[in-house]
Image (spheres, rainbow, N blue to C red):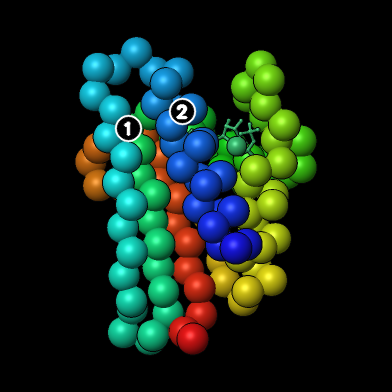
């Protein structure tokens, strides 16, 4: 249930980021894989405006938001849930040539 909360938060953020851009294409990619170490990796990629340089860490601070009606609690809650499960989460710009943001989440092997 907690992981469901994390995923809903990430998908909402991606949808809101893409709604704020004036691009005609809105593409959301959810990629899950099991690494050779047995860890689970989940990525959420969007085609929104991405992250302003240097903001990657600040986004996870409580009450940090760039939205008029944002709460700024989504990412801090995601991080605390993921870290409590022994995993890690980060948000950065995509590095696959496409523009937009990428969330990468890793969870330990079951
Ligand atoms: N997919 C994304 N693309 C661009 N910026 C994002 C994305 N996800 C989160 N952000 C940035 O991180 C900030 C904090 O996100 P979050 O903690 O979920 O709070 P909120 O959604 O209430 O603003 C957002 O206001 C936005 O600036
Ligand atoms: Mg949010």
The image quarter in which residue 86 lies = bottom right
Q: Is residue 90 left or right of residue 85?
A: left
Vertical side of 90 occupied by 19: above or below: above
**Residue at the outermost top position:** 22
Q: Position of residue 96 (x, y in %)?
A: 25, 47
Identified at 51% across, 80% down, the residue is: 108
- Mark 2 is surrounded, within 10 Å at the Cα level, by few (under 14), some (14 to 19) or many (20 or more) other residues, namely many
The residue carrying mark 2 is: 17
Examine the rendering and report whether any part of residue 27 can be seen: yes
Are dots 2 and 1 in contact, CB under 8 Å?
no
Identified at 23% across, 41% down, the residue is: 97
Foreground pick, 43 / 50: 43
Q: Is residue 106 left or right of residue 31?
A: right
* Ligand 1 neighbours mark 2 (CB distance < 8 Å): yes
Identified at 70% across, 35% down, the residue is: 72
Vertical side of 45 occupied by 3: above or below: below
Badge 1 element = loop
Q: Position of residue 105 (x, y in %)?
A: 48, 62
Disc number placed over residue 47 in the picture, else none: 1
Separation (CA) of disc 2 from disc 1 = 8 Å
* Ligand 1 neighbours mark 1 (CB distance < 8 Å): no
Ligand 1: image quarter? top right
Q: Position of residue 47 (x, y in %)?
A: 32, 32
Of callouts 2 and 1, the N-terminal one: 2
């Amino acid at each position: 249930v907690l992981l469901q909360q994390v995923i809903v938060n990430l998908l909402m953020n991606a949808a809101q980021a893409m709604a704020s851009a004036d691009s005609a294409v809105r593409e959301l990619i959810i990629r899950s894989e099991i690494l050779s170490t047995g860890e689970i990796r989940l990525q959420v990629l969007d085609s929104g405006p991405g992250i302003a340089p240097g903001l990657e860490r600040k986004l996870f601070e409580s009450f940090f938001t760039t939205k008029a009606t944002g709460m700024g609690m989504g990412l801090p809650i995601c991080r605390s849930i993921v870290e409590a499960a022994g995993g890690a989460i980060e948000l950065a710009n995509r590095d696959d040539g496409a523009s937009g943001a990428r969330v990468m989440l890793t969870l330990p092997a079951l």
